[in-house]
Amino acid sequence: MSLHIRPIQASDDVCIQQIILQVGKEFGAIGEGFGPSDAEVAQMSQHYLAEQRSRYFVAELNGKVVGGGGIAAFNHSADTCELRKLFILPQGRGQGVGRQLSQACLAFARDQGYNRCYLDTLSNMDAAIALYHSLGFERLTQPLDGTIHNGCDVAMLKVL
């Protein structure tokens, strides 16, 4: 198995959009209040820029893009970032892709000076929630003020 994590390029936009939409549909994340509906999904490479303290990473497994995940400021915060749109195709699951993507995102977040990392997800994404717990995220009783993903029913936070 050959896994490579790298920053997104414009040539990845269509593929990543398809992955986000496909996996979102699989888990019922359809419509307003869910990440796959965000306008940025159509051109992820244009919305995750280093000068904005954000980056989206792509995971290639044996030369094929199988997922991605990103970091960006949460609600324009200087100290809190958000782990965003971590979506992996079924063929990439159970092979450490999510862990390596998450670790790349968290390392970038630390390098950018963020102190906390927030995420929201769905309670039916059991493997993702278990991964986030193993990485030190703690479940919150309610989402942080300012989240736009009010369709999500799990909110988590990690001190970096």
Image: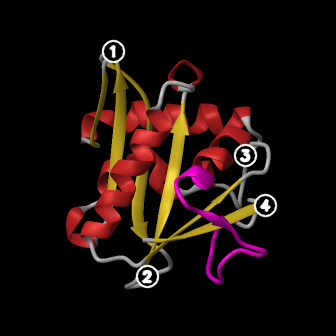
Label 3 sits on what residue type? Answer: Ile
Position of the N terminus, as image quadrant, is: top left
Marks 1/4: CA–CA distance: 34 Å
Marks 1/2: CA–CA distance: 36 Å
Q: Which residues are magenta?
A: 132-149
In the image, residue 80 above or below residue 33: below
Label 1 sits on what residue type? Answer: Asn
In which quarter of the view is residue 22 placed? Answer: top right
Query: Label 2 neighbourhood size at 10 Å, few (<14), some (14-19), many (20+)?
Result: few
Q: Which residue is mark 1?
A: 62
Q: Residue 136: percent from the left, percent from the top? A: 55, 60
- Which of the two labelled residues, at mark 1 and mark 3, occupies the earlier sequence position? 3
* Residue most extreme to the left: 51
Q: Which residue is mark 4?
A: 153
- Which of the two labelled residues, at mark 3 and mark 2, occupies the earlier sequence position? 3
Left/right of residue 33 with respect to residue 46 in the rendered view: right
Seen from the viewer's position, the closer of residues 101 and 18 is 101
- Classify mark 2: helix, strand or loop: loop
- Which of the two labelled residues, at mark 3 and mark 4, occupies the earlier sequence position? 3
Position of the C terminus, as image quadrant, is: bottom left
At horizontal 79% and vertical 50% (from top left) the residue drawn is 123
Q: Which residue is mark 3?
A: 30
